[in-house]
Every structure is written in structure tokens, then in C-alpha cells.
């Protein structure tokens, strides 16, 4: 009964275009922010941080990035893992070359470097579309992983070929390295998620976002109303890669601490993030976040239930997980191509009318 | 009255009392070939400020190709396009849009994943001043600008009487309304020249009447110059000031509806002629 827009009249265009037009939604959003910033950090332990929260937050950023490119601008990319690797290695190079540089800026700069690389690999999109573009970005994926394996400069010629994050702190709090507290990792990632989700929302509701969606829906008509396809596509690649680069930098420096590129940023990472946005919802900010949450939580949940409660063997549980994720993707593609976000919208529609659906 | 003798800067008054200005766009000896196929052959005509100019002709006459040439989709092998007294260099469609030329398509080309409001807002693309960084921050100039565009768009929504479908994704709308939204998107650009490719194709009589009224109102209220392709002769003869007739890529007639109606070559092209 509370979930109503009746009586909540909008008298300005600003109010009409706000992110959460229904008051109940706004309150919910602020409540989640308060809990996320004010409550969770006090209770989080290292298991919850490493198994659930930190990977969820980082994947949410990567999914947001890919969703901007694929969901909003309609350019399919299979190079997400490779671009995350660019972010990770750029962050590593900044951290080791400039030890005094604030870790926050290291991550941001890593994102900018990735944006440039993304634009470079986005150039083929001006000529090719769909599957062919997907293959071109697949080439980026394999090339970038090969590059970071092959060229010693990127991993500072370390004997293992790995990159390891040195200890860095922000305002006296250790953020990277083995001595980091769980809550510090969590909060650092959370700040990035909130900031980037806000930027993504603003971009997608303004002219830039509309030019991306115009290119996605009907590129010829988009050109005729004045969208420069070069600018629209490359800006989508740049923004998307920036997000993915930040995610890669955080994945390496805050979450894992040490990375072997082929293992961590391989093709399976690209697919994982693609599955997140397909399950969550293409062309939806909320969908990116809920998709990331879903695919991070599902394995944890399955492992706890199958191995912990039912006492199955670990490898069987892993295979069952593959089965379930694969089945879900097929089901969603057939039944609800717009993913969990569309389901959520339907629920909200129903809620608005409840209890008198007619 | 023949307009052939009229100078390109001179204006004239139509029978219904509207003043038509000088020439805004002039096509000079346009020839367009696709390999060996000649789509448009040595065609010249002009469009005057404030007039409704119809392009008619049988199927495959090259009418849509002509619009595509104006739009910059096709680049003619020969000929010149003069716009506002300047020869136009070959340019891309989005550059043409920035010159103030908007258009609708024969087969509706709306952005199906977006709402009616967003579709028409994209029409403001050529008027956006804030850059991506400002838009990412939203608060301040970007939001102010967005609201200004929204105001213009809301006026168009009122004008086209589509208030009720403002927030409906256009993919769900019936055909007639989609045509109307597409016209709205073109109008949002506040074009100097509006190209309509068969705005009434596939419509019933009432919808055609509505659309004709909108076209006349656009021309009357905003003073927009309109060039349109249409197959319904009744509509064309009623609403247009001058008509170009094309057949097999050639121009076979040009003049007021009355002149066209009595043009023997046009009658032959439409009704056929006995070969002996």
C-alpha cells in the first residue's frame, strides 16, 4: 500500500526525470546506502569480504562497464578480461613506478589507460558489427593476455611472471597488500561502485546515453538526426573500458593482491561478465549490479548447500554450478531477454497496483 | 501562373495567401549511378523557403534516392547541391543534420528500445551544447540544458497530441502513432528543411487526414520548408505548392499541382501510353 506514485505529483522536469521517481524507492535507496556505509563495515569479517562483498563490488563495476558498451551502445565485446588485465597491469606499473602516488589515483589512472586501449580496440566497430565485432574484441582479449605474459616490462621482470601489489595506504589506512583489513577493502571498493554507478546513470539519462542507445537501436536513423557514429561508438568504448579498467585495477590490487594474467583475466572472465549483464539485464544500471550479485552469490550459496549441508564432493558441486548457470542463461535468453532487472520492473508494476490489480 | 521565370531570391504568394521565399536548396544536374544502373539522371530542381515541395513518381523512379542524396547517404557522381546560397561539399549524414536538415523514413526508423519522450529528445541532438563530462556530473549545466530541451520536446508532444504515450516504449505503439513520433523526432531538431519519405504510407483515411493536418500546421506555425515523397495523389495535389515528377530517374515534370495535372508526359507515365 505504501508503494504508490499517486499523490506524488511532479511539478518540474528535473523531478520527472529523477532516478527514483517513487518515494518508497528513494527511501529504500538511501537506506541501502546507509547500511552499506554505516553498518556493514563494522560487522564484515575477512570471509565475507573475500568471498562475497569485495568480488561482488568489483564485478559490479566491470558489469556496469560492459553494460554501457553492450547493453546501451549495442557493441558486443568479448574482450572484458583483457581490458581488466590492462587496468591491473597499468595500476601495478603506477604503484611500482610512483610509490608516493595515492592508490586512489593509481586506480583512476589505470582506468584512463584502459579507456585509451579500449578506444584503440574499438576502432574496428566503425566498420563491423555484431558477431564480427565480437570476434575482433576476442582478438583483443587474446592479444592483451599474450602481451602481458610475454613482455617482461609489464611485470617488472619478476621471476614468477606474476604481479604482486605492494602495500599502499590511504589516509593512514592500509588498502592494498597482505595486511589489509577486510573493512578497508570493502569500503574502498564501495566508494568506487557508488561513484561509478552514479556517473553511469547520469551519462545514460543524458544526451550521451541517448546517442548510444540510438546507435544500438537504429544506427542509420541515429546518423540522420546528427549522431556522429565515430564519437558515439568510441565514447562508449572509452567509458566502458574506463569502468572495466578500474575493476581490473581493484581486482588485482585490493582483492587478489597477486595476479597471473592468463589465470585471472582469461577468456572465462570475459564470459562471466557477459553472463552477468545478460542475467542482470542489458541496458540497465540496476541489472548490472544485480547480475554481478547473482553470479557471485550463486557459487557461494551452492557450495554451502551442496558441500556444506549435503556433503557432496567439491568437484561435483562445481559441475552442478556450471549446469545451473548454463541452464539459467538459456532460460533467461528465451523467457526474459531483459534479465533480472525486467523481472524486478514487473514486480514493481504489480506492487503499484496491489491489492486492486484492475 | 508559371514560376519558371522567378528569380532565385524573389518571393511569391501562393493562391492561399502564404508567402514563399527565395530558394534554400538547389539541386543542379544530379546524376547518381550504382555501377551500371543509373538511379538519377541529370536532375535539377529547387526548393524555396517555406514551401511544401512534393516529389512524386512511380515505384523505382529514384525519389528515395533523391532524398538520400540530399541527406548525404549517397554521393552523386555528377552535379552540385546548393544550400542557402553555398555549394555543399560532400558530407556525411550527421553533418547534414547539423546543417538543419531532418527527415523521416519510408519504413519507420525509430529507436524501439526507448520511450516516445527519449526518441523525441534524441531529435535535439544537434542542439546539445554540454559535453560528456558535464553530462556525467549531471548537476548544473547539463541538467539545466536537459530541462530546456525537455520544454521544447513537450511543446512538440502537445502539438502532435501524443501526451498519453510519453513514457511508452515506441516498439509497443501502433503504426500510425509511430509515424507521428517519428515526425516529432524530426521536428525536435527545429529543421530548416524537413524531408518526409512517404509520411502517409499504409495509413487509413482518418490517419492520412491527421498527418496532412500536422504537415500543414508544421509548415504554417514553424514556417518549416518541407519536401515530401507521397503516392497518394489526392494528398499531394491538395497540400503541396510545387511538385517534381520523376520517372526512371529522369525529371518529367515540375510545377504547380495544376500544371502537373495537365502535363501530358506525366499523364503518360502514370496511365501508360499506347505504342503503335
Image (cartoon, coloured by chain):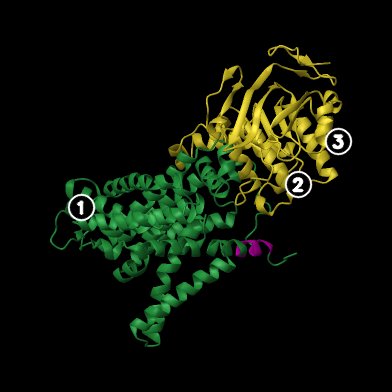
Q: Residues within 10 Å of mark 1 (few under 14, many from 20)?
A: some
Q: Which of marks 1 and 3 is in front?
A: 3
Residue B76, given in percent of the width and then of the height, sits at 58, 30
Question: What color does chain B have in the rendering?
Answer: yellow
Disc 1 from disc 3: Cα separation: 81 Å
Tell me the quarter of the picture where residue A262 sits.
bottom left
Chain ID, green in image:
A
Residue carrying label 2: B176
Figure check: A313 above or below A290:
below
- Please provide the residue range marked out in magenta: A347-353
Tell me the quarter of the picture where residue B118 sits.
top right
Give the residue drawn at x 34%, y 70%. A51
Q: Mark 3 lies on which chain?
A: B
Residue carrying label 3: B274
Q: Is residue A351 magenta?
A: yes
Residue A214, given in percent of the width and then of the height, sits at 56, 45
Same-subunit check for callouts 1 and 2:
no
Q: Which chain carries label 1?
A: A
Amino acid at each position: 500500500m505504501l508503494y504508490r506514485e499517486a499523490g506524488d505529483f511532479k511539478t518540474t522536469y528535473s523531478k520527472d526525470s529523477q532516478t527514483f521517481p517513487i518515494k518508497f524507492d528513494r527511501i529504500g535507496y538511501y537506506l541501502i546506502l546507509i547500511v552499506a556505509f554505516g553498518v556493514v563495515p563494522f560487522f564484515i569479517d575477512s570471509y565475507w569480504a573475500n568471498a562475497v562483498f569485495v568480488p561482488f563490488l568489483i564485478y559490479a563495476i566491470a558489469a556496469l562497464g560492459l553494460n554501457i558498451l553492450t547493453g546501451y551502445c549495442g557493441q558486443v565485446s568479448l574482450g572484458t578480461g583483457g581490458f581488466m588485465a590492462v587496468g591491473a597491469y597499468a595500476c601495478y606499473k603506477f604503484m611500482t613506478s610512483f610509490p608516493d602516488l595515492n592508490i586512489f589515483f593509481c586506480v583512476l589512472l589505470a582506468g584512463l589507460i584502459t579507456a585509451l586501449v579500449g578506444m584503440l580496440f574499438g576502432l574496428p566497430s566503425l566498420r563491423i558489427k555484431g558477431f564480427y565485432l565480437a570476434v575482433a574484441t576476442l582478438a583483443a582479449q587474446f592479444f592483451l593476455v599474450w602481451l602481458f605474459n610475454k613482455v617482461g616490462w609489464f611485470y617488472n621482470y619478476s621471476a614468477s611472471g606474476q604481479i604482486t601489489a605492494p602495500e599502499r595506504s590511504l589516509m593512514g589506512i592500509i588498502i592494498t597488500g597482505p595486511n589489509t583489513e577486510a573493512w578497508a577493502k570493502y569500503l574502498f571498493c564501495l566508494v568506487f561502485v557508488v561513484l561509478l554507478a552514479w556517473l553511469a546513470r547520469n551519462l545514460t539519462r543524458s544526451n550521451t546515453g541517448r546517442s548510444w542507445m540510438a546507435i544500438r537501436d537504429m544506427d542509420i536513423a541515429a546518423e540522420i538526426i546528427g549522431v556522429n557514429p565515430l564519437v558515439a561508438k568510441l565514447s562508449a568504448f572509452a567509458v566502458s573500458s574506463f569502468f572495466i579498467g578500474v575493476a581490473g585495477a581493484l581486482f588485482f590490487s585490493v582483492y587478489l593482491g597477486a595476479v597471473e594474467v592468463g589465470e585471472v583475466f582469461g577468456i572465462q572472465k570475459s564470459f562471466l561478465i557477459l553472463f552477468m549483464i545478460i542475467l542482470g539485464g542489458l541496458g540497465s544500471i540496476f541489472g548490472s549490479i544485480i547480475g554481478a550479485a547473482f553470479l557471485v552469490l550463486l557459487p557461494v550459496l551452492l557450495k554451502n548447500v551442496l558441500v556444506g549441508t549435503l556433503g557432496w564432493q567439491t568437484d561435483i558441486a562445481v559441475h552442478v554450478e556450471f549446469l545451473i548457470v548454463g541452464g539459467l542463461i538459456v532460460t533467461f535468453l528465451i523467457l526474459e531477454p531483459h534479465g533480472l532487472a525486467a523481472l524486478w520492473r514487473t514486480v514493481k508494476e504489480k506492487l503499484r497496483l496491489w491489492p486492486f490489480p484492475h | 501562373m508559371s514560376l519558371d521565370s522567378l528569380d532565385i531570391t524573389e518571393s511569391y504568394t501562393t493562391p492561399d495567401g502564404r508567402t514563399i521565399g527565395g530558394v534554400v536548396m538547389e539541386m543542379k544536374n544530379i546524376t547518381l549511378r550504382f555501377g551500371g544502373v543509373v538511379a538519377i539522371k541529370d536532375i535539377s530542381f529547387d526548393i524555396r523557403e517555406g514551401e511544401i515541395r512534393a516529389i512524386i513518381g512511380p515505384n523505382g523512379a529514384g525519389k528515395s534516392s533523391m532524398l538520400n542524396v540530399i541527406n548525404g547517404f549517397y554521393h552523386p557522381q555528377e552535379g552540385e547541391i546548393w544550400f542557402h546560397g553555398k555549394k555543399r561539399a560532400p558530407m556525411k549524414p550527421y553533418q547534414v543534420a547539423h546543417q538543419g536538415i531532418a527527415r523521416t523514413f519510408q519504413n519507420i526508423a525509430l529507436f524501439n528500445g526507448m520511450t516516445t519522450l527519449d526518441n523525441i529528445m534524441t531529435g535535439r541532438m544537434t542542439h546539445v551544447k554540454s559535453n560528456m563530462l558535464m553530462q556525467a556530473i549531471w548537476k548544473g549545466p547539463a541538467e539545466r540544458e536537459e530541462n530546456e530541451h525537455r520544454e521544447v520536446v513537450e511543446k512538440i508532444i502537445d502539438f502532435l497530441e501524443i501526451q498519453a504515450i510519453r513514457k511508452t516504449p515506441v516498439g509497443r505503439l501502433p503504426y500510425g502513432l509511430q509515424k507521428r513520433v517519428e515526425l516529432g523526432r524530426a521536428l525536435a531538431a527545429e529543421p530548416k528543411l524537413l524531408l518526409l519519405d512517404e509520411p502517409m504510407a499504409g495509413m487509413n483515411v482518418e490517419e492520412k487526414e491527421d498527418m496532412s493536418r500536422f504537415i500543414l500546421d508544421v509548415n504554417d506555425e514553424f514556417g518549416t520548408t518541407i519536401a515530401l515523397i507521397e503516392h497518394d495523389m489526392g494528398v499531394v495535389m491538395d497540400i503541396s505548392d510545387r511538385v517534381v515528377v520523376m520517372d526512371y530517374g529522369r525529371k518529367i515534370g515540375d510545377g504547380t499541382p495544376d500544371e502537373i495535372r495537365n502535363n501530358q508526359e506525366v499523364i503518360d507515365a502514370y496511365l501508360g501510353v499506347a505504342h503503335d
